[in-house]
């Protein structure tokens, strides 16, 4: 099946919210990690989301000029071709984009999709993220209003992060402290500025103790029950039940119960990067250690071409990452839910 159309993407999100499951959103940095994500979703019979961060896009643009837009567009175009061979629907998304990178990333990509829509085609990406968590909430929402209008014109869904997520990702960092919790007041101000769908659909990355990076269970204090408070607080003021489509950031090390609580309270998308990076790299390390004298020309020898051929270890990496995505689908209850 092709990359999800705007209509299919909306249906995917609606079904996730109604069914209390979420789609893994997998960060990719190459054609091979893209295939690993597609394979994992196909093996789990789950639709899904594939995303490219600013750092990932820069890497994809090549180290000669590191152009983010070039990298993102190139992989998105590639995805539109190869996704046809996988029996799942996949939405393309761009991950965290702070204020200083909007002009070099999200705004040009929005314009590309706007032109495609004007020509009667579907947008290149199905959603983009604006990460204004480093700004004041007032400035964050002002920029979000502008981006939401542009996204709606291009048939794209906007993701907004209104309060900080701890840790660091692609150069955006926040302290890990008691401020990492979105308040009902924050949520109400967001609804007042962005509406509840009438100005365009958006996903909300609210903070409930989330932290980017690598943490063992118990090292981060998550309060996913807070999401219910946000839903109910906004519903009481605006009269719309369960108004938000939430995104779960910084999920590494989360317990199954924490994930389940988040799903019950409206999470429809969960970002997964750290765990899939490890799942991709671990089989490569194993291959290199086991074939040390084959991948290196030791003591003047010639090595073993079959050992250092990137395809030999690349296949192992793809399989390892795909298997981790299957597990993610199981944890998020999306297994077997693909649209027919």
Image (cartoon, grey):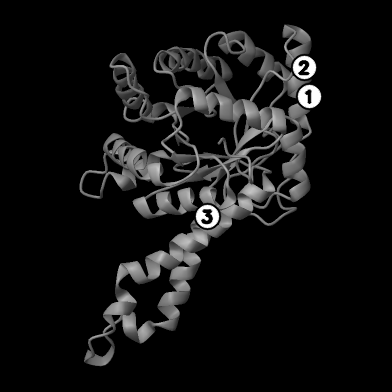
Q: How many marks?
A: 3
Residue 233's label in the rendered image is 2
Work out how far the residue at label 1 is from the one at label 3, CA to CA, in angstroms. Answer: 31 Å
The answer to whether the residues at label 1 and label 2 have Cβ atoms under 8 Å apart is: yes
Report the front residue among 98 and 178: 98
Look at mark 3 in the image and give the residue it sits on: 276
Distance between mark 3 and mark 2 Cα atoms: 35 Å
Q: Answer with left or right where residue 201 lies relative to residue 188.
A: left
Would you say 325 lies left or right of 209 here? left
In the rendered view, would you say 167 is above or below 309? above
Mark 3 and mark 2 in contact? Answer it, CB < 8 Å: no
Is residue 313 visible to the viewer in this orientation of the structure? yes
Disc 1 to disc 2, how far (Cα)?
6 Å
Asked whether 68 or 118 is in front, the reply is: 118
User: In this figure, which residue is indicated by the disc labeled 1?
Assistant: 229
Q: In the rendered image, which quarter is residue 211 located in?
A: top right
Neighbour tally class for label 2: few under 14, some 14-19, many 20 plus, Cα within 10 Å: many
Considering the numbered disc 2 on the image, is that residue within a helix, a strand or a loop? helix
Q: Quadrant of the N terminus?
A: top left
Q: At 75% across and 42% down in the image, what residue appears?
A: 260
The spot of residue 144 in percent (x, y) is 49, 17
Q: Residue at x 47, y 75 (%)?
A: 286
Residue 9 as seen in the image, left or right of residue 310 = right
Q: Position of residue 22 (x, y in %)?
A: 64, 37
| Label 1 CA crowd tier, 10 Å (few <14, some 14–19, many 20+) | some
């Amino acid at each position: 099946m092709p990359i999800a159309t705007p209509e299919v993407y909306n249906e995917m999100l609606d079904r996730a919210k109604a069914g209390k499951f979420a789609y893994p959103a997998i960060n990719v940095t190459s054609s091979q990690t893209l295939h690993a994500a597609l394979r994992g979703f196909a093996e789990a019979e789950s639709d899904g989301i594939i995303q490219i961060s600013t750092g990932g896009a820069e890497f994809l643009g090549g180290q000669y000029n590191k152009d983010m837009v070039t990298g993102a567009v190139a992989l998105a175009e590639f995805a539109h071709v190869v996704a046809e061979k996988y029996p799942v629907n996949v939405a393309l998304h761009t991950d965290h984009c702070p204020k200083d990178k909007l002009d070099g990333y999200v705004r040009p990509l929005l314009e590309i999709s706007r032109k495609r829509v004007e020509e009667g085609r579907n947008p290149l990406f199905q959603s983009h993220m604006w990460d204004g968590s480093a700004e004041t909430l007032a400035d964050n929402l002002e920029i979000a209003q502008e981006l939401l209008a542009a996204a709606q014109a291009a048939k794209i869904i906007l993701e907004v992060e209104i309060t900080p997520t701890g840790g660091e990702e692609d150069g955006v960092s926040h302290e890990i402290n008691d401020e990492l919790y979105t308040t009902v007041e924050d949520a109400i101000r967001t609804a007042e500025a962005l509406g509840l769908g009438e100005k365009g659909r958006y996903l909300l990355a609210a903070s409930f103790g989330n932290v980017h990076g690598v943490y063992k269970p118990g090292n981060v204090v998550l309060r996913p029950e807070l999401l219910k408070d946000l839903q109910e607080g906004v519903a009481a003021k605006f009269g719309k039940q369960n108004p938000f489509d939430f995104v779960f950031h910084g999920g590494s090390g989360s317990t199954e119960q924490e994930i389940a609580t988040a799903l019950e309270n409206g999470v429809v998308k969960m970002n997964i990067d750290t765990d899939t990076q490890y799942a991709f790299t671990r089989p490569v390390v194993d291959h290199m250690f086991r074939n040390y004298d084959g991948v290196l020309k030791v003591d003047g020898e010639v090595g073993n071409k079959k050992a250092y051929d990137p395809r030999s270890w690349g296949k192992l990496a793809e399989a390892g990452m795909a298997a981790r995505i299957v597990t993610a689908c199981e944890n998020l209850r999306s297994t077997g839910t693909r649209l027919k």
